[in-house]
Image (cartoon, rainbow, N blue to C red):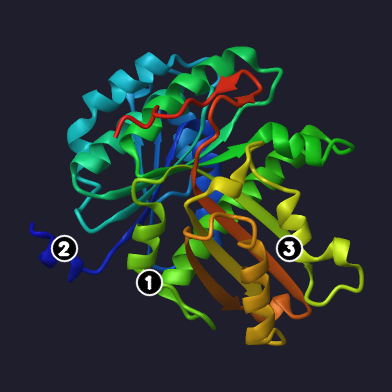
């Protein structure tokens, strides 16, 4: 299909969960009931797969590899290739595909890069959204590092959510709270991007905006925050909360792109939303591509919620736990 023909085709959104953590997330996405989004679950564990509410399920390896915690990434990768024909049938060239996984365990680490590779070979526009293990999970960190390198090779961009960052932000609360908050960000990002493109919104974006902001951008992170629309204390502003809550401990001021999703009630005015977007991009490269969208929902009256996705991050030699995310590992 020629590019001119492709641009005339309506884009579909697919969210594909790989492994136990990925499928836990797609369950929540399915429960959110996002219109126009197809949900697919892919796993090596028949019992876990059966319990998901995805519209389509693909069992890898005939269910021989029970449990994503004990799984071997190489076995999961092989199982994806064995199921290639079934996986190929998921994709069309006009699709926008979100590959969702927790990297570190066997099924997600092995399957996510291979599913992304197949989707891209089918012509789909592929974005990874992954979570990294906690610092104490050294074996998973090593497996996750290798998987992340592959996933960056086969996607336009990978949005990274580091569980350790959320554990630090919620250090006085139980570990499941950190997991839940990280999942909440992933769900919010997917919901926000889809809604920003499909509407209805106060300020809408387009599928072309999404493609421009993510195409060939490599590593991406999320800044998120929620506050009253006009807090009396500036330290409690939504912009301040975003600045201190990156989903990965890297310097995001060198970002080459930023997609801002602002959700508020009907009481937000256009100038307030524009001021938030302007403030969030004040310190990044002035030549960066910036797109922002404002979504209005009645339950959010008096409050404003923001997800700022910084794309094209170049962390250099910075260590993230035992992760060393090197420049050039995208292998485009």
Q: Is mark 2 on a helix, strand or loop?
A: helix
Quarter of the image that includes the C terminus: top left
Compared across the picture, whether 270 is left or right of 215 comes to right
Q: Can residue 328 be seen in this view?
A: yes
Residue 319 image-quadrant placement:
top right
Compared across the picture, whether 241 is left or right of 41 comes to right
Label of residue 239 in the image: 3
The structure residue drawn at horizontal position 70% and vertical position 31%, both measured from the top left corner, is 164
Question: Which circle's residue, 2 or 3, is located before the other in the chain?
Answer: 2
The structure residue drawn at horizontal position 54% and vertical position 23%, both measured from the top left corner, is 104
- Residue 102: x %, y % from top left: 53, 33
Label of residue 206 in the image: 1
Label of residue 198 in the image: none
- Residue 10: x %, y % from top left: 24, 69
> Label 1, label 2: how many angstroms apart (C-alpha)?
15 Å
Label of residue 6 in the image: 2
Nearest the viewer among 66 and 78 is 78
Question: Which circle's residue, 1 or 2, is located before the other in the chain?
Answer: 2
- Residue 126: x %, y % from top left: 34, 47
The structure residue drawn at horizontal position 43% and vertical position 49%, both measured from the top left corner, is 54
Residue 59 image-quadrant placement:
top left
Asked if disc 1 and disc 2 are in contact, CB closer than 8 Å, the reply is no
Does residue 202 lie above or below 251 as drawn? below
What crowding class fits label 2: few (fewer than 14 Cα within 10 Å), some (14-19), or many (20 or more)? some
């Amino acid at each position: 299909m020629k590019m001119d023909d492709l641009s005339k085709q309506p884009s579909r959104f697919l969210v594909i969960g790989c492994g136990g953590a990925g499928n836990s997330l797609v369950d929540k996405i399915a429960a959110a009931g996002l219109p126009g989004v197809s949900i697919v679950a892919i796993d090596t564990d028949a019992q876990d797969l059966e319990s998901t509410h995805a519209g389509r399920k693909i069992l890898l390896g005939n269910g021989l590899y029970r449990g994503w915690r004990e799984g071997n990434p190489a076995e999961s990768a092989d199982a994806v290739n064995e199921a290639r024909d079934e996986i190929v049938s998921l994709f069309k060239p006009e699709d926008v595909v979100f590959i969702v996984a927790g990297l570190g365990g066997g099924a997600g680490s092995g399957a996510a890069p291979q599913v992304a590779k197949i989707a891209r070979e089918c012509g789909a526009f592929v974005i990874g959204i992954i979570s990294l293990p906690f610092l104490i999970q050294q074996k998973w960190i090593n497996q996750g590092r290798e998987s992340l390198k592959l996933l960056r090779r086969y996607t336009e961009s990978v949005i990274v959510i580091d569980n350790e960052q959320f554990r630090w932000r919620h250090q006085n609360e139980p570990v499941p709270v950190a997991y839940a908050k990280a999942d909440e960000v992933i769900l919010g990002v997917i919901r926000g991007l889809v809604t920003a493109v499909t509407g209805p919104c106060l300020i809408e974006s387009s599928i072309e905006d999404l493609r421009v902001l993510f195409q060939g951008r490599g590593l991406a992170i999320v800044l998120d925050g929620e506050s009253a629309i006009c807090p009396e204390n500036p330290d409690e502003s939504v912009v301040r909360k975003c600045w201190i809550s990156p989903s990965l401990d890297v310097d995001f001021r060198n970002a080459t792109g930023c997609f801002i999703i602002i959700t508020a009630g009907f009481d937000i005015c256009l100038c307030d939303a524009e001021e938030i977007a302007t403030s969030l991009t004040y310190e990044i490269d002035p030549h960066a591509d910036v797109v922002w969208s404002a979504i209005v929902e009645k339950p959010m009256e008096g409050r404003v919620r923001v997800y700022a996705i910084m794309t094209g991050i170049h962390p250099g030699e910075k260590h993230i736990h035992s992760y060393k995310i090197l420049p050039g590992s995208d292998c485009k």
